[in-house]
């Protein structure tokens, strides 16, 4: 019965936030074909290059272990993209998965040189193990930013990941500015820690990116979607009510 309650709770949450998105002209879609996601990401103007762990040629995702979402506007143009996958880290942990580059590449040896390196000094990453939901490749078109969409997308995707996988942990990488602007609070992640450095080659130049790891535990996810939890952050829209139309 508890599983049924959780499913109903997730379904209710998704419906509420899908309605809120519709009010501002966004229709949300979900996909499972990452070849299609790669095509969309590569042809969407202003979208950053797709992350390697969501490129099927570098890191294939098995059926049932990944999904992506797309938001389109009233003209059916892409306004939101985000990708999500499940890692089985039984017998290992996220820190080791970063250090080995396995989080990004199915065969890390193809990138095992001085131009591709990940240093993970976030001690919290060593405690993240088991079934780990990784959320990444998140993009919102400029004209839709600053409207609280990050909070809605986080609630939708966290609910989907919980319903599909019931992970032991849910995590993502963010840059420091996301913390400074309070976006991490919108992502509803209770834990964050810095010191993850990723060295890559971009357009012939060596770039060193510094990231923060943010995460939630499986218990925190279960508490959010428990049928007895009446958390107003889940049930209420983050937008003010629309003014009544003139009659």
Image: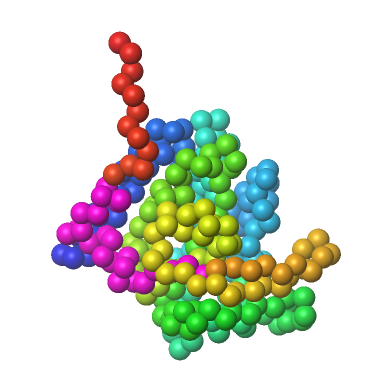
Q: Is residue 190 magenta?
A: no
Q: Quadrant of residue 46?
A: top right
Q: Residue furthest front?
A: 180
Can residue 125 be spotted in the picture? Answer: yes
The reply, left or right, for residue 222 in relation to residue 212 is left
Q: How many marks?
A: 0
The reply, left or right, for residue 95 in relation to residue 220 is right
The residue range painted magenta reads: 213-235
The location of residue 12, given as percent across then percent down, is: 27, 49
| Front residue of 215 and 80 | 215
Can residue 97 be spotted in the picture? Answer: no
Give the position of the N terminus as an image quadrant.
bottom left
Q: Is residue 228 magenta?
A: yes
Residue in the image at 42% along x and 69% along y:
191
Give the position of the C terminus as an image quadrant.
top left
Q: Residue furthest right?
A: 204
The location of residue 71, given as percent across then percent down, is: 50, 43
The location of residue 172, given as percent across then percent down, is: 50, 66
Q: Is residue 113 above or below residue 176?
A: below
Q: Residue furthest top?
A: 247
| Front residue of 112 and 4 | 112
The location of residue 195, given as percent across then percent down, is: 58, 75
Residue in the image at 66% along x and 72% along y:
198
Q: How is the image coloured?
A: rainbow
| Front residue of 90 and 118 | 118
The reply, left or right, for residue 189 in relation to residue 227 is right
Residue in the image at 18% along x and 65% along y:
2
């Amino acid at each position: 019965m508890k599983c049924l309650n959780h499913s109903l709770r997730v379904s209710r949450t998704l419906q509420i936030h899908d309605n809120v998105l519709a009010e501002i002209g966004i229709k949300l879609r979900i996909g499972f074909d990452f070849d299609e996601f790669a095509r969309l990401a590569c042809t969407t103007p202003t979208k950053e290059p797709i992350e390697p762990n969501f490129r099927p040629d570098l890191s294939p995702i098995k059926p049932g272990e990944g999904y992506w979402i797309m938001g389109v506007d009233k003209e059916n143009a892409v306004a939101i993209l985000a990708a999500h996958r499940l890692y089985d880290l039984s017998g290992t942990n996220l820190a080791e998965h970063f250090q080995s580059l396995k989080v990004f590449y199915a065969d890390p040896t193809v990138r095992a040189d001085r131009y591709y390196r990940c240093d993970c000094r976030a001690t919290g990453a060593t405690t993240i193990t088991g079934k780990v939901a990784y959320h990444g490749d998140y993009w919102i078109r400029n004209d839709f930013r600053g409207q609280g969409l990050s909070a809605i997308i986080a609630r939708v995707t966290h609910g989907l990941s919980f319903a599909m996988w019931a992970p032991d942990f849910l995590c993502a990488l963010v840059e420091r500015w996301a913390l400074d602007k309070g976006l991490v609070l919108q992502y509803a992640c209770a834990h964050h820690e810095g010191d993850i450095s990723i060295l890559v080659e971009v357009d012939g130049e060596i770039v060193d990116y510094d990231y923060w790891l943010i995460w939630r535990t499986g218990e925190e996810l279960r508490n959010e979607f428990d049928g007895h939890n009446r958390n107003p952050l889940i049930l209420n829209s983050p937008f003010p009510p629309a003014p009544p139309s003139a009659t």
